Image (tube, rainbow, N blue to C red):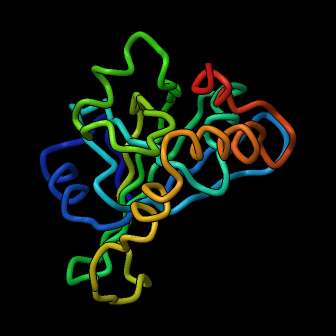
């Protein structure tokens, strides 16, 4: 049932673009493995082997810390509607912080929203599809506005303080590089 590809095909990209949620996976050489659900308008497929995703401010910042130690990343999408399918993209990625020279160009497809911490640039080296027969049917009721409201209420200065107090280390005490956004 599972099939492997060395790049994203047009059908894969159409499937990705139709999903309302995706999941990210990262891990340092030691310590905890992180899996996070992502939504909103935070992902762009730029080509058959290149994906960007925008990391908005949240309660943790594990991916940035993991990528600083080991660039492995997995992204996963699964259909909750009529087409049973799971798609995983495996590869390597790097975190681009707000003060990096290439920030403006990489965040441009997302409009540089308030609360954007990093953009992740992923190079895909393996794509795998599998059946998804056990994934339940679920209806998409809409996106939440909670994060946008929380971010707006915090404001730029409040976000920087939050990054410094809450997002500067992984759960395992490793630096996330968010300090570059505070300078």
Query: Could you tell me which quadrant the N terminus lies in?
Result: bottom left
Q: Residue at x 65, y 57 (%)?
A: 59
Q: Is residue 32 left or right of residue 60?
A: right
Picture coordinates of residue 101, whole percent (x, y): 41, 10
Residue 13 % position (x, y): 19, 49
Image: 124 above or below 140: above
Residue at x 38%, y 62% (from the top left corner): 39
Rendered view: 3 above or below 175: below
Point 60% across, 38% down: residue: 160
* x and y, in percent, of residue 75 in the image: 45, 49
Is residue 1 at all visible to an observer of this figure?
A: no
Which quadrant would the C terminus be assigned to in this image?
top right
Residue 105 falls in which quadrant of the image?
top left
At x 40%, y 60%, the residue is 148
Residue 24: x and y in percent read 51, 52
Of residues 138 and 126, the one nearer the viewer is: 138
């Amino acid at each position: 049932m599972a099939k492997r590809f060395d790049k994203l095909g047009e059908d894969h990209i159409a499937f990705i673009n139709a999903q309302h949620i995706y999941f990210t996976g990262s891990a340092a050489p030691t310590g905890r493995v992180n899996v996070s659900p992502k939504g909103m308008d935070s992902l762009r497929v730029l080509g058959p082997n290149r994906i960007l995703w925008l990391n908005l401010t949240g309660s943790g910042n594990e991916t940035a810390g993991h990528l600083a130690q080991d660039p492995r990343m997995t992204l996963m999408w699964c259909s909750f509607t009529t087409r049973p399918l799971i798609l995983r993209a495996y590869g390597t990625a790097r975190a681009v912080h707000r003060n990096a020279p290439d920030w403006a160009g990489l965040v441009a497809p997302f409009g540089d929203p308030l609360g954007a911490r990093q953009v992740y640039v992923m190079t895909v080296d393996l794509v795998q599809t599998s059946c998804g027969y056990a994934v339940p049917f679920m209806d998409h009721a809409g996106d939440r506005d909670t994060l946008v409201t929380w971010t707006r209420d915090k404001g730029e200065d409040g976000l920087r303080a939050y990054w410094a107090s809450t997002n500067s280390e992984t759960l395992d005490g490793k630096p996330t590089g968010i300090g570059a956004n505070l300078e």
